[in-house]
Structures are given as C-alpha cells and as structure tokens.
Image: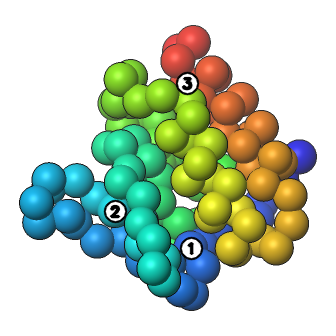
Amino acid sequence: MISMDVRLRLADKARLKKDPRTGRMMLLYPERGLELSQTAAAIAELCTGARTVREIVDAMRGVPLDLSDRLERYRSALVQIANDTRGGSAEDVIDEIQTLARETLEK
C-alpha cells in the first residue's frame, strides 16, 4: 500500500489542459490524452509534488464528489499516473484511492 507521506506529482511529460471544445480538463501525454472528470481533475491538480497523499486527501474532503464518475475512468487515469511517476505498481495507488473514496462516501 502506498504511504500517506509520499508526495505525488504528475510525470514530467504529463500536463493538465482544458479542452477548448468540451471545457473539461484533459491529462495530456505525448501522443495521447485522457478526459478527466471533475473529481479526477481536482485530484490531478493537487499532484504537484508539494503535497503528500494525506494532504491531498484532506484537501479533497471539502470537494463535492462527481458521483456520475465511473471507477474505470479513475483506474485508467491512476494507472497511467502511477506508472509514469512511480515506476512501480499502479495497483497500490488504485487500492489506496478506492479505499479513500469509500471512506469519503461513507461520511
């Protein structure tokens, strides 16, 4: 499981940009992109390397979740972020985010 004290940041080659056509945030990589939900975009914007997982979770507690989002969209984004930034197992990141999402929804 990923430590709550790890500082998360997007890969150097990844960037966030608003899609001028849809107005939604995109996570862009060389030659590919992923449209993000409001919740995923809010999380990605916090992944600057300045905050720990714990701080990101704390910051997201006040943000209303976009409940129409589907877990598979998060999985896809998190797999790519984890693979590009940690060079290790994306499953740890996914498990942690799923646990935190469940805990948030229960509150």
Residue 26: mark: 2
- For numbered disc 3, what is the local secondary structure? helix
Residue 104: mark: 3
Name the front one of labels 2 and 3: 2
| Spatial CA span between label 1 and label 3 | 23 Å
Position of residue 70 relative to residue 94, above or below, is above
Residue type, numbered disc 1: Leu
**Badge 1 vs badge 3, beta-carbon distance below 8 Å:** no
Position of residue 48 relative to residue 5, above or below, is below
Residue 10: mark: 1
| Spatial CA span between label 1 and label 2 | 13 Å
Residue 37 image position (x, y, % from top left): 35, 43
| Of the pair 63 and 28, the residue shown nearer to us | 28
Quadrant hosting residue 55: bottom right
Whether residue 10 sits left or right of residue 54 in the image: it is left
Residue 19 image position (x, y, % from top left): 20, 64
Identified at 67% across, 32% down, the residue is: 98
- For numbered disc 2, what is the local secondary structure? strand
